[in-house]
Image: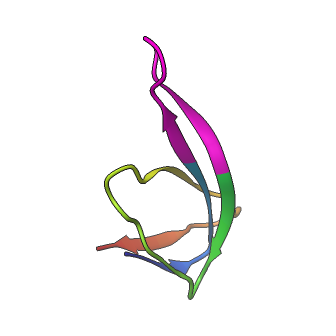
């Protein structure tokens, strides 16, 4: 579970394509997580990239 406390974080979720010899990540969706939002991560297979998309500090808590 992830809670967003301050700022905005841009999250890109990916699917792992493992067909063939060279596995690769395929973007599956983009979300802007703002302060107050809660997100749930479901392993295995939850592959994501998170970046601060604001011009100031962004804070999130991962539990």
Q: Position of residue 6 (x, y in %)?
A: 55, 79
Query: Which image quarter is the N terminus in?
Result: bottom left
Q: How is the image coloured?
A: rainbow
Q: Position of residue 10 (x, y in %)?
A: 64, 59
Q: Kindly identify the residue that appears in the image at 68 percent across and 67 percent down.
A: 32
Nearer to me, 30 or 7: 30
Q: Kindly identify the residue that appears in the image at 56 percent across and 83 percent down.
A: 37
Q: What is the chief secondary structure element of the magenta stretch? A: strand
Which stretch is magenta? Answer: 14-28
Nearer to me, 12 or 60: 12
Q: Assess whether residue 22 is covered by the magenta stretch.
A: yes
Q: Kindly identify the residue that appears in the image at 37 percent across and 64 percent down.
A: 42
Query: Which image quarter is the C terminus in?
Result: bottom left
Is 35 placed above or below 41 here?
Answer: below
Residue ranking furthest to the front: 19
Q: Position of residue 34 (x, y in %)?
A: 64, 77
Q: Kindly identify the residue that appears in the image at 43 percent across and 11 percent down.
A: 21
Side of 37 where 63 appears, left or right: left
Q: Looking at the image, how many numbered discs can be counted on the residues?
A: 0
- Among the 4 quarters of the image, the one containing residue 3: bottom left
Residue ranking furthest to the bottom: 36
Q: Assess whether residue 30 is covered by the magenta stretch.
A: no
């Amino acid at each position: 579970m992830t809670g967003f406390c301050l700022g905005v974080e841009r999250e890109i979720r990916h699917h792992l394509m493992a067909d063939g010899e060279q596995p690769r990540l395929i973007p599956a969706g983009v979300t802007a997580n703002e302060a107050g939002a809660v997100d749930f991560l479901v392993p295995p297979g939850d592959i994501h990239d998170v970046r601060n998309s604001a011009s100031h500090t962004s804070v999130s808590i991962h539990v």
